[in-house]
Amino acid sequence: MKLSCRIFKILVLFTLLFGFWGTVSSAAERQVCIPVSEGDSMPGRYFRPEQPISPPIPGILVAANVGGLKLDQYHWYCRKLAESNFAVLLIDATNFPQSLTPGHDTWRKIPYQIWAWTNHLTIAARLALSHEWYVDNIKSAVNYLGNLPEVDRRRVGVSGFSQSANAALASASGNKKLKCVVWNNGGWPWILPYEPSKLPPVLIFHGEKDGVYDVKYARQLACELDSAHKDYECYIYPGERHMFNLYYDLNKGGSVAWQNPALASSFEKLIMFLGKVLQNGSTLKSLVVQTGPHPK
């Protein structure tokens, strides 16, 4: 495993040295191997803009949950970020064995839903014993992304979903390598400790009808950031459920994603936030906003 990672990194470096950014690449996505603690490795998928763009560019780490590396919705999310001129690294922050996870579009489908929830409960049991490994996985991925020649290590952020949103928050607490956190549908934040006063700007997305993590956790985080006088934006969408700003029906085609007003609206706000923080370096106005489509 270690040898294969070294060989992969040598090939990537060779490609970059010979004009990787000088032409439009026919493959804007590639699999990567990320070194983590204790000599282990973690698979990832790297997305870059297809159009020529002068490096260095801002980087976004997208931290998914168990099996997320296989789900097409995450790939869609990362491609859209890359189209907005960000270098994007997708990981399953739990580093759960990919061979033991269902793939493609498995959410909310039986029997795959049972399989997925069994995996999630396995991670929850491990988190009950220790959380350092989870945070270290994200930090290792941040280091990997920041060390890519085309990425500006001074402009790297993390977008975490569900439980990985909490790990992203913990990894960013006091970490100067991370310039912002996107906290998507997280909850129970005290499981993974963080210090609000030591966080970079935070963008919060949550569905008011989230049945996995209650919306009260989003409001709690916003209140803590406000009390700490930190920059943040909080968007709570009425009527929306868990992972509303990522999930859509693959059977109807990717274009149907934009027919979901909440998904389209939240992604637009995501790009605006990242543009202000990572591309323009602007200061945000601390503000709690409730927006999005109302329940029918």
Image (cartoon, grey):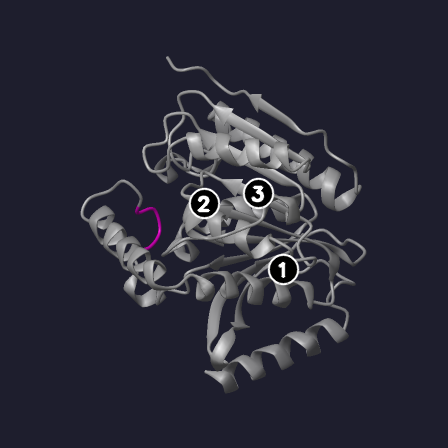
Sequence order check: which comes first, mark 2 or mark 3? 3
Residue 262 visible in the current orientation: yes
Which amino acid, by three-letter code, is at mark 2? Pro
> Position of 241 compared to 232: left or right?
left
Sequence order check: which comes first, mark 1 or mark 2? 1
Residue 95 x/y as whole percent: 41, 65
Furthest-top residue in this view: 296
In the foreground, 192 or 140 = 192
Q: Is residue 104 magenta?
A: yes
Residue 91 x/y as whole percent: 49, 59
Quarter occupied by the N terminus = bottom left
Determine which residue is flagged by label 1: 26
Mark 2 vs mark 3: in front: 2
Residue stretch rendered in magenta on the structure? 102-106
Query: Which element type, helix, strand or loop, lies under badge 2?
Result: helix
Residue 43 x/y as whole percent: 47, 68
Which amino acid, by three-letter code, is at mark 1? Ser
10 Å crowding of disc 2: few (<14), some (14-19), many (20+): some
Main secondary-structure element of the magenta-colored stretch: loop
Determine which residue is flagged by label 2: 189
